[in-house]
Amino acid sequence: MRFGRAAVGYHLHRLWTCGEDLGSDDPPGTGVTAEWQPGASAAFVSAIDYPLYVVTACAGGEMSGCLAGFVTQASIDPVRFLVCVSKVNHTYGVARRSRGLGVHLLGSDQRAVASLFGEQSGDQIDKFQGIAWSTGATGSPILSECAAWIEGNVVDLIDGGDHEAFLITVTAGGAGTRPGRFMRTDATDFEAGHPQ
Ligand SMILES: Cc1cc2nc3c(=O)[nH]c(=O)nc-3n(C[C@H](O)[C@H](O)[C@H](O)COP(=O)(O)O)c2cc1C
């Protein structure tokens, strides 16, 4: 099976949200080919699970935030994380102008917060109205309710394709009160608020 560019974006969107095995029409054992085939990686992507985070930023008085799964620790000393933000998201424009980012691990009972940040866009609504937050040292909004949080200064940007990876050096953080973890497999029915 071959996919055009739009279809590739659609597949990535579905891999965020569904995690289902999209399969491939290619016969097994065809090996590596020069042409990228999204279906070939779907089995790998759908086999992994990971926590979902709320990534926040603020620049020029404008706040933004989105749900993100593409987040990972990148260094122990200094403590650094990679946070990958889609270039079409409202959050991306704000994050590019922001000194730092806030990153929040959500508790297993925070489905409504996950939906707010993952299924709505700052292009349409103010996600910070009606939830409790405070301003962090980087200027990023820090959610009052979460399982744990960090914030850090952006020290590098890496172009990942349709996402950009923000490398942050952690400057503050703390434990939250919400138990458990809200995982990607808890959000298989979510529809991203800002589709690719
Ligand atoms: C399960 C799930 C995982 C997501 N992971 C990411 C991600 O890693 N990076 C990202 O930029 N957007 C991700 N998104 C999409 C955004 O959270 C979503 O499009 C959001 O509505 C964008 O909000 P904004 O336009 O206010 O920034 C994910 C969405 C869902 C439902």
Image: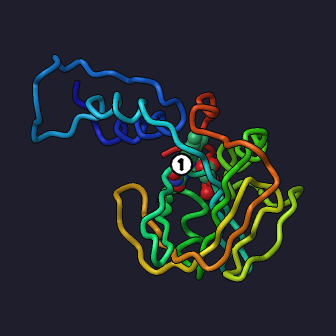
The residue carrying mark 1 has its beta carbon less than 8 Å from ligand 1? yes
Above or below for 182 versus 165: above
Q: Residue shown at 59%/82% (left/top)?
A: 99
> What is the x, y in percent for residue 39?
29, 29
> What is the x, y in percent for residue 51?
58, 45
Q: Which residue is mark 1?
A: 69
Q: Secondary structure at mark 1?
A: loop
> What is the x, y in percent for residue 81?
49, 66
Callout 1 crowding tier (Cα within 10 Å): few <14, some 14–19, many ≥20: many
Q: Is residue 103 left or right of residue 5?
A: right
> What is the x, y in percent for residue 86?
49, 56
Q: Quadrant of the N terminus?
A: top left
Above or below for 27 versus 76: above
Of 119 and 187, the residue lying toward us: 187
What amino acid is at disc 1? Gly
Q: Quadrant of residue 9?
A: top left
Q: Residue shown at 59%/29% (left/top)?
A: 188
